Amino acid sequence: MNLKLRAASSIISLQALSDSSEEDTATFLVKGLVIGQTSVSAFVIDKHGRKITSAPQQIEVFPPFRLLPRKVTLIVGAMMQITSEGGPQPQSNILFSLSHESIASVSSLGHVKGLSVGNMSVTGVVQAVDTESGKLVVVSKDQVDVEVVQLKAIRIRAPITRMKTGTLMPVYVMGLTSSQTPFSFGNALPGLTFHWSVTKRDVLDVHTRHASVQLSAEHNFAMSVFGRSKGRTGLRVVVKTSVPLAGHLQDSALELQDEIQIQVYEKLQLLKPEVQAEEILMSPNSLLKLQTNRDGLGSLSYRVLDCPDRAALVQVDDEGHLTSGSLTGTASLQISSQETFGVNQTIIVAVKVVTVSYLRLSTSPVVYTSNKETVSAIPLGAVLTFSVHFHDSTGETLHSHNSALSFSTNRDDLVQVGKGSSNGTLTVRTVNVGLTLLGVWDSEQAGLADFLALPVQHAIHPAEAQRLVVGDVVCFSAQFVNQEGVSGVWSSSSSALLEIDPRTGAAVARDRGTVSVYYEIPGQLRTYREVKLITSTSGKTMKILWSKSVMPVKLQINSTPVVFVQTNKTQPMFLNCKHTEL
């Protein structure tokens, strides 16, 4: 039959196939060319010359549906979330199924948890409603492999074993194979603990990874080591399990351990004359914009010395754009400034083009506490900036690189991670309480990787205040202050429901509903806690809640600051939340 098919746009191609055996049927091959949506309609010219057109049929061209990561390795008791990319948009829920339900379990969110040792697969299916039949049909599906193991042994992953004094290096625990990363065991339940030590404390310092968060032993699978003074020392880690029958370690072992030797040596310096010999460190094929204190004031010029044999190493233009080539080596860069008052200044700097040996994550901002004690988790609601630093084989930090960063988390429901405002930074926003594992690596060199634990907890206390009865009085508290030791400001998302004093944190429940209590240190931290307010059904009288760090105090009318609490009692009460060392 002379039936033709026509597309509304060119995002698909149509090819007529050989005629069907059925007289009133035509077959076409439809190929998606560009991602998007269009429609197709069929038309035919009847024997009277009239054009008969069908109703348009909607077609969506979508990128291939893929489950990520492609392979998951877990120990018994650990969890990893399987996410997806591509597929039809907006994407409906993915239906997950397992090839062996005794080896692992999977939730509707794709949370895969290791149950017993073995290999299996997880299949994800995307369904849609067929417009003609009204039935659910499979639009796309994909499958990933899951391996559940027990830790047989561990090893310390240290990118270098010789480092200069004053340099930093990340270290973390791995299993025997490269697939057994901290993602495989870092969140196992009931859990492992990681205990680090050095044989010579004056040579090497070992710190937790966050600027002002002292992680607990359960989260210390990754640490930072700092070259303190010259010498040789052993770095040791012991991984313990509190419940041998949980199956984390092979043969119900109680602990595993590993030790490596690290040498710290002094940086070469000139003692006579006592001058600082500085250098610029660049990775191959990278770019660095030079800046001096005479920019815009003097006439600047840049020149690479030893030009004939160093042209392929580094190049610099008149604007101070320094570019490295594909080779490694050292060149000399001359920078001159001709001043308007007749003086010429010149400096010569060494430029070293080196390969990247490792990357390291650092966190900001630094948080401070009123009692000078460290915290063991990130406050809920905090926004952190993670900076990625690249280092050479001596531990020195590079000034420029050309690495393409990739990042991943073991789950996406507790923190939101995105690229930061500048190159080499990530922004992490905490949205729910719990533990998330973060991994960052170079897309072209998988060996350049770093891992961090991101435990998130409530920072506003008392915990009992998350559910209040109308009329209750609360002394909210938080231990965070600014750098000068000044406390933050309290607020409520609805003063009609929960009235709170902005300075002391004293609050009274006014009406039923759900509100958020905020504690903010401007420019540094904003944390919150949800509070549910209900009406009393038992006729109980008003109660006062406070945490260990504060206590409620009744004040005279002439005392300040004071919070007036209107209750159903005949006599008003004046309340302040006084900080105490209890």
Image (cartoon, rainbow, N blue to C red):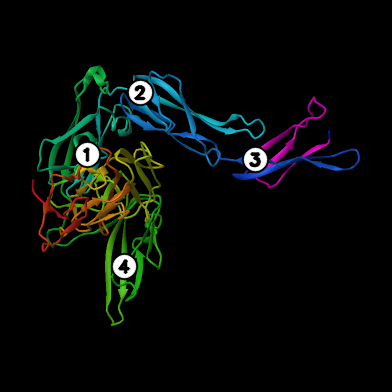
| Residue 107 percent location from the top left of the image | 41, 29
Which sits earlier in the primary sequence, circle 3 or circle 2? 3
Q: Are marks 3 and 4 in contact (CB under 8 Å)?
A: no
> Mark 4: few, some, or many residues within 10 Å (few <14, many ≥20)?
some
Foreground: disc 3 or disc 2: 3
Which sits earlier in the primary sequence, circle 1 or circle 3? 3
- The span shown in magenta is 2-31
319 in relation to 377, above or below:
below
- Residue 200 is left or right of residue 338, and the answer is left
Residue drawn 78% across and 39% down? Answer: 4
- Position of the C terminus by quadrant: top left
Which sits earlier in the primary sequence, circle 3 or circle 4? 3
The circle on residue 59 is 3
Label 1 to label 3, Cα distance in Å? 57 Å
Q: Residue 572 lies in what quarter of the image?
A: bottom left
The circle on residue 161 is 1
